[in-house]
Image (cartoon, coloured by chain):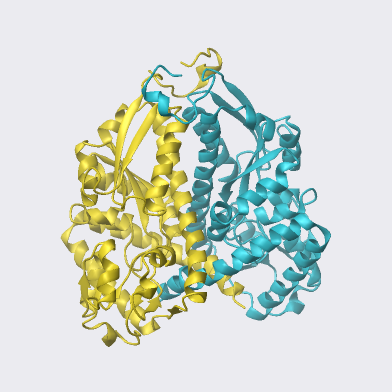
Chain colours: A yellow, B cyan
Amino acid sequence: MLGCDKECASVTATTENPTKTFQWKMVTTWPPNFPIFQEAIEQMSKDLEMMSNGRLKVQVFAGGELVPPLETFNAVSQGSVQMGHGAAYYWAGKVPAAQFMSAVPFGMTAKGMNAWFYGGGGLELWRKIYKDFNVIPFPAGNTGVQMGGWFNKKIEKMEDLKGLKMRIPGLGGKVLAKAGGTPVLLAGGEIYTALERGTIDATEWVGPFHDERLGLYRAAKYYYYPGWHEPGTTLELIVNAKAWEELPEDLKKIVEVAARSSNQWMYSQFEAFNIKALRELKEKYKVEVLPFPPAVLKELKQLTQQVLDEEAVKDPAFKEVYDSFTQFKTDNAAWNLISDDAYNAALQP
Amino acid sequence: MLGCDKECASVTATTENPTKTFQWKMVTTWPPNFPIFQEAIEQMSKDLEMMSNGRLKVQVFAGGELVPPLETFNAVSQGSVQMGHGAAYYWAGKVPAAQFMSAVPFGMTAKGMNAWFYGGGGLELWRKIYKDFNVIPFPAGNTGVQMGGWFNKKIEKMEDLKGLKMRIPGLGGKVLAKAGGTPVLLAGGEIYTALERGTIDATEWVGPFHDERLGLYRAAKYYYYPGWHEPGTTLELIVNAKAWEELPEDLKKIVEVAARSSNQWMYSQFEAFNIKALRELKEKYKVEVLPFPPAVLKELKQLTQQVLDEEAVKDPAFKEVYDSFTQFKTDNAAWNLISDDAYNAALQP
């Protein structure tokens, strides 16, 4: 107890040993200094230290500094580090249902994802599918709607996707393959050169801000398309379950609240920076943003459903999460239609 | 220092007296037990106590329990309480520019508001306009797009608004007056009876969840319309500046992070509950949701601009905030058009 007597008696949970200091390590899936992604996590670490008055110190390592980026989940699961930050679809090979906790094609935007997590049972399901790995997840960031990418030709019909070599990972890549294209896996650092040399015909990356940073607008003459494959990618803070149990209640609450605060903060940073970058891409670099034809989007949506249905047959946990996600998405779409969608349509001149 | 030596040396700020306990009071503008609004703030108070291990105890009083709801700002400004929770447009008589910090007709939705606050200079402006009152604001909650309200007849043209007696406060009311209607001020508890007895022809309240709770769907046969006047009402945590300065750095950070966490939490609660309530209103109570005709929305938008321009002439601070808000809103709309709007359109069957 911290020197008060009667006043503190009503505190529902106090730490048993408030002088104990925790020295933790966190690994992330992001490159060093990766704007917003890595930067916001380093800020969160500083906030944790300050909120706990130095009792919870989390040393942050970018991808590759301590373990390879895609070893983040394993490292947290095994307890070799206490915390990690990344996106759940990176663990699709291990936990297929995890993909719903980051982004699936034609899924929900940030608004719906967060409503599902915090008020629709999504977070409970997330805890459930990570439980056997001794990992506790928290939503902690959202990229917003990611752009559909840069294409070296106009996409006017489904045939235009046939034979297209595009850098697009995950479920989006599986959908492209069903459409006759060739999904290519490339790390961020390899994209620009591949695009410039014509090794690939198209690529997606993140959004206007990160795409501009990578210089994709000058890799060649490219058309820029809106997104369909990652409508609101949730980022995650993951904590080793045993380490979590060792934390006193006050530090647990500090981590929980800091994660939710980061969830809000990172999303708003993505939006603010994308807003500015889009204006620059259009005005300064004369980038042409084109819409996918409705028929193409409709077809991609049908192919997505095939892909998800195929995954659901293979894995009961995937099926359980898919069902909850789909029901919430349907209700959310009905509400969107008369709230944000109706309103944003009214805003148009 | 909390019992560590070398490890704590790197902490950028530590409390000078970590044993000091703060006993604060918070007043809100909300009725006791008001779902989400008051409930979430009581939860935030519990979180503050737990995160601080009992060193920051905030006793929460609903509107009228300690001071009248609309005295919240004054009470915080004068320091008779240390904290308050409400919405900035309640202080329009004192700080006209404050309205942009909650909601203005045809303004931005939650996504844009938060991007403006956290990444577009909005929060700095907010701090500036409250500075002379010794009040420090934090965004802490968002209702999402509020519904346009319940009408006892279909609105098919501007003439249908002429003579309409509608419960609609603030700038929305001013716009209705310009359209020839009569804005009526009524507290929440008076709305149902006024509507049932035909004292008013129409009313807005919050959204499907709160509107259902108030029973508006059974006050008579009413048509339910989407919103235009409060597209993403931000709720605020306000702190007395002198009390704030007395907090050690760790507790300041705890308050700042808890406010941002509540901002995310409350918005997601509104969304999740509205999603469920809308389905119930439509399926169980056969409520008819109708769109305002585009010509009516266009005219309301023009009238809104007249109202805002008139306010801007009267007050330089209003003008300064209006300019920042308008620039950000314009860029945000361009980004929306190719991100959330394009995506949500693609989702439609």
Relative to residue A349, is residue A36 drawn left or right? left
Q: Residue at x 59, y 23 (%)?
A: B22
Number of numbered discs overlaid on the protein picture: 0
Above or below, comparing residue B267 to residue B69 in the picture: below
Quarter-wise, where is residue B206 in the image?
Answer: bottom right
Q: Position of residue A133 (x, y in %)?
A: 21, 42
Q: Position of residue B63 (x, y in %)?
A: 69, 39
Relative to residue A282, is residue B233 drawn left or right? right
Residue B226 seen in render: no
Q: Position of residue B1 (x, y in %)?
A: 46, 19
Residue A39 seen in render: yes
Q: Position of residue A6 (x, y in %)?
A: 55, 13
Q: Residue at x 22, y 78 (%)?
A: A181
Relative to residue A29, is residue B247 drawn left or right? right
Above or below, comparing residue B139 to residue A96 in the picture: above
**Which of A14/A317 is in front?**
A14
In the picture, the quarter occupied by the C terminus of chain A is bottom right
Farthest residue to the right: give it.
B314
Above or below, comparing residue B176 to residue A75 in the picture: below
Q: Residue at x 60, y 41 (%)?
A: B38
Q: Residue at x 34, y 66 (%)?
A: A205
Quarter-wise, where is residue A294 in the image?
Answer: bottom left
